Image (cartoon, rainbow, N blue to C red):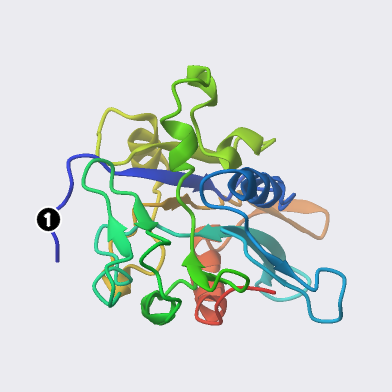
Amino acid sequence: MTETLARQLALVIDLNVCVGCHACVTSCKQWNTSGSAGPLADERPYGAQPTGTFFNRVQTFEAEQFPDTQTIHFPKSCLHCQDPPCVPVCPTGASYKRKEDGIVLVDYDKCIGCKYCSWACPYGARELDEERQVMTKCTLCVDRIYDEALPPGDRQPACVKACPTGARLFGDVNDPASEVSRVIQERGGYALMPEWETRPANHYLPREVTAQACDGQAQPATQSAAAQVNPAHRKHSMAGRNT
């Protein structure tokens, strides 16, 4: 296990208010295609089996059993782990973690597209750009958050700026005074699949279902939504990215 960095930028995603609109997906694609990470290729976009390079995806599924099913929208991208398994397996040193802010990045000039990082990542967060044959991933819009030409309010990842419900927060999770750290503590924010011991920097705020309709009367929920999300999501996480 590597030492904990003094500063760790990350996303905190509120599953309570994510509506699965995919604004984060499209804004991420647009910004990164036109920025330092792009162009992000799309292969056969109108064909029978289209594929594309996306840094952020939203998985939608149902939990529980009918008639008490719940639709869950689960955004997922690189979690910028504090112990990223993708870094030590890279044979060329293309995958690396920045000490100044904890962002995990890929040096495209060194990447040979071997996919070792993809195999090592338990979250399916790596994407192969089929046109350039390099591995790509979420950069937390590193070319945007430090751009002094932008107004301070715009120096956030594109997905955070685009979210219409405010479901995405951005900040230093290692700073106990930051907004993201406070909301993690107050809302019981959790890291995805902690059993892998990668110490993900990104956190999720659990869904809070307070009542269910039953015979026309509101009844207390018998199971927290956070308990519903984790097992259901884990069944999908190892399947890799959606196409």
Relative image position of residue 85 (x, y in whole percent): 29, 72
**Callout 1 secondary element:** loop
Whether residue 161 is situated above or below residue 69 in the rendered picture: above
Camera-side residue of 174 and 67: 174
Farthest top residue in view: 151
- The quarter holding residue 109 reads bottom left
Residue 58, quarter of picture: bottom right
- Identify the amino acid type marked 1: Glu
Looking at the rendered image, the quarter that the N terminus falls into is bottom left
- Give the residue displayed 35% in from the left and 34% down from the top: 182
* Any part of residue 69 in sight: no
- What x and y, as percent, mark residue 112? 41, 75
Front residue of this view, candidates 197 and 102: 102
Give the total of numbered labels: 1
Q: Is residue 157 above or below residue 154?
A: below
| Above-or-below relation of 52 to 7 | below
Q: Give the camera-side residue of 6 and 49.
A: 49
Q: Residue at x 63, y 59 (%)?
A: 40
Q: Is residue 3 left or right of residue 170?
A: left
Q: Within 10 Å of the Cα at label 1, are there few (<14), some (14-19), or many (20+) other Cα atoms?
A: few
- Residue 237 at x, y percent in the picture: 52, 75
Residue topped by disc 1:
3
Q: Quadrant of the C terminus?
A: bottom right
Does 43 sit left or right of 186 as displayed?
right
The percent coordinates of residue 106 (x first, y second) are 39, 60
